[in-house]
Image (spheres, helix red, strand yellow):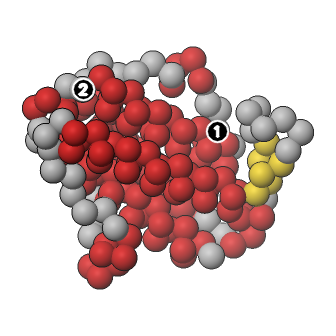
Amino acid sequence: MVTLFQELLHHQAYADASLLMAIRQHEVASKDQKLRTLLHHVLIARRFWLHLCRGLPFSVDAEDVVPTTLDEIIRGYRETHTQDNAWLQRLEESDLFRTVESPYLPNREVFVRDALMQVCLHSHGHRAQCAMRLRMLGGDPPSLDYIVWLKDRPDPIWG
């Protein structure tokens, strides 16, 4: 199951980078506050769950400030994916059954595997929203399908 999560999160990095580059190439979309806010939300949600899984501190107040430029957001995605990938490469099957506690789900323990699935599914849904927003602003969203990515499994290109 670790291999599956490694693949899902590798695809996520590719899909995030591809979408971010498509947004960066579209002048109106690259300056759109709604897109920046949504992209930032996805990033901090990912960071929250993966920090929790890794046993790292997470400051909601510090993380909650939406960057003023798309480039800052892209940098945050790239750095986060790099750090998380290093952790994922050391992940063992037994780690998936360790539990974590979220302050947002009181009196409930969450398995690491479920937190990882939350990261994958949450970002997937929001990437679709971002792609729709990009199209609404006149841009052309890239194909981000997992099944298409599987053929060559390209690495993310952050620009």
Pointer 1 local density, CA inside 10 Å: few below 14, some 14–19, many at least 20: few
Residue 138 x %, y %: 13, 40
State which tag comes first along the sequence, 1 or 2: 2
Residue 96 percent across, percent down from the top left:
71, 64
In the rendered view, does 141 fall on the left or right side of 83? left
Give the Cα separation between the discs numbered 1 and 2: 32 Å
Q: Residue 145 location in percent, x, y?
A: 34, 67
As helix, strand or loop, the secondary structure at mark 1 comes to: loop
Is 105 situated left or right of 63 in this image? Answer: right
Question: For the point 37% across and 56% down, which residue is it?
Answer: 13
How far across and down, in percent of the image, does residue 84 sit?
A: 49, 52
- In the displayed structure image, the side of residue 37 where residue 108 appears, left or right: right
Q: Is residue 4 visible?
A: yes
Residue underneath mark 1: 56
Residue that protrudes farthest toward the right in the picture: 107
- The numbered disc on residue 32 is 2
- Of residues 77 and 79, the one drawn nearer to the viewer in this rendering: 77
Q: Residue at x 54, y 39 (%)?
A: 45
In this rendering, the answer to whether 1 lies above or below 89 is below
Examine the rendered structure and indicate whether residue 37 appears above or below residue 130.
above
**Image check: 130 left or right of 112?**
left
Q: Is residue 92 above or below residue 32?
A: below
Q: Amino acid at mark 1?
A: Leu
Residue 78 found in image quarter: top left
Q: Quadrant of the N terminus?
A: bottom right
In terms of secondary structure, where does tag 2 sit? loop
Is any part of residue 87 visible from this angle? Answer: no
* Other residues around mark 2 within 10 Å, as few (<14) / some (14–19) / many (≥20): some
Question: Disc number at residue 88?
Answer: none
Residue at image x 68%, y 62%? Answer: 113
